[in-house]
């Protein structure tokens, strides 16, 4: 089964995940996106729950990059934000806020 992968966009039009990727050179986003492409085949690999309905996928490259996302129903993954091990606590909190916003403040 194919899984649809989408990026979260805030009510104000910001795309936090995309903005994070744009901070890098060309190689780093390609490596991170290769990890995301595996999601489409329901191959999530090394993923753990970080609470509030948010999941964390580790990218085994560079500075310990992380991708934070939520699963909505069976066939949708919503990319919320990305970060590194150094910003993990802040990134998790932000991802949880974005996930609640996506769900309509529930």
Image (cartoon, rainbow, N blue to C red):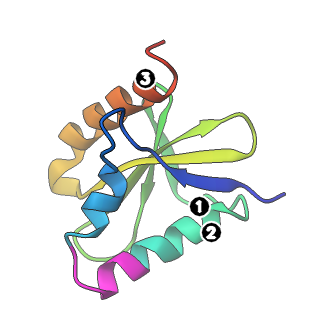
Name the residue located 51 percent from the left edge and 70 percent from the top edge.
35
Return the mark for residue 11.
none
CA distance for labels 1 and 3: 24 Å
Q: Are marks 1 and 2 in contact (CB under 8 Å)?
A: yes
Question: Toward which corner of the image does residue 89 lie, by quadrant?
Answer: top left
Q: Are marks 1 and 3 in contact (CB under 8 Å)?
A: no
Which residue does the numbered mark 2 point to in the structure image?
38
- Please tell me whether residue 62 is drawn above or below residue 13 in the rendered image: below
Which residue does the numbered mark 1 point to in the structure image?
45
Return the mark for residue 100.
3
Residue 80 on image: x %, y %: 41, 45
Q: Nearer the viewer, mark 2 or mark 3?
A: 3
Q: Nearer the viewer, mark 1 or mark 3?
A: 3
Instruction: Tell me the crowding category of disc 3: few under 14, some 14 to 19, or many 20 or more residues within 10 angstroms, Cα based.
Output: some
Lower position in the chain sequence, tag 1 or tag 2: 2
Question: Toward which corner of the image does residue 101 lie, by quadrant?
Answer: top left
Element assignment for label 1: loop
Residue 10 on image: x %, y %: 36, 37
Question: Please, which residue is most extreme toward the right here?
Answer: 1
Residue 23 highlighted magenta (yes or no): no
How many labels were placed on the picture?
3
Name the residue located 44 percent from the left edge and 30 percent from the top edge.
99
- In the image, 24: left or right of 45? left
**Which residues fall within the magenta stretch?**
24-30
Residue 6 on image: x %, y %: 55, 52
């Amino acid at each position: 089964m194919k899984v649809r992968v989408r990026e979260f966009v805030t009510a104000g039009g910001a795309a936090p995940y995309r903005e994070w990727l744009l901070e890098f050179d060309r190689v780093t986003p390609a490596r991170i996106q290769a990890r995301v492409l595996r999601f489409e085949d329901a191959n999530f690999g090394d993923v753990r729950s970080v609470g509030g309905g948010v999941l964390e996928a580790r990218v085994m490259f560079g500075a310990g990059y992380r991708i934070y996302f939520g699963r909505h129903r069976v066939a949708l993954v919503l990319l919320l934000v990305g970060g590194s091990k150094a910003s993990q606590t802040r990134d998790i909190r932000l991802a949880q806020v974005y996930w609640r916003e996506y769900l309509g403040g529930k």
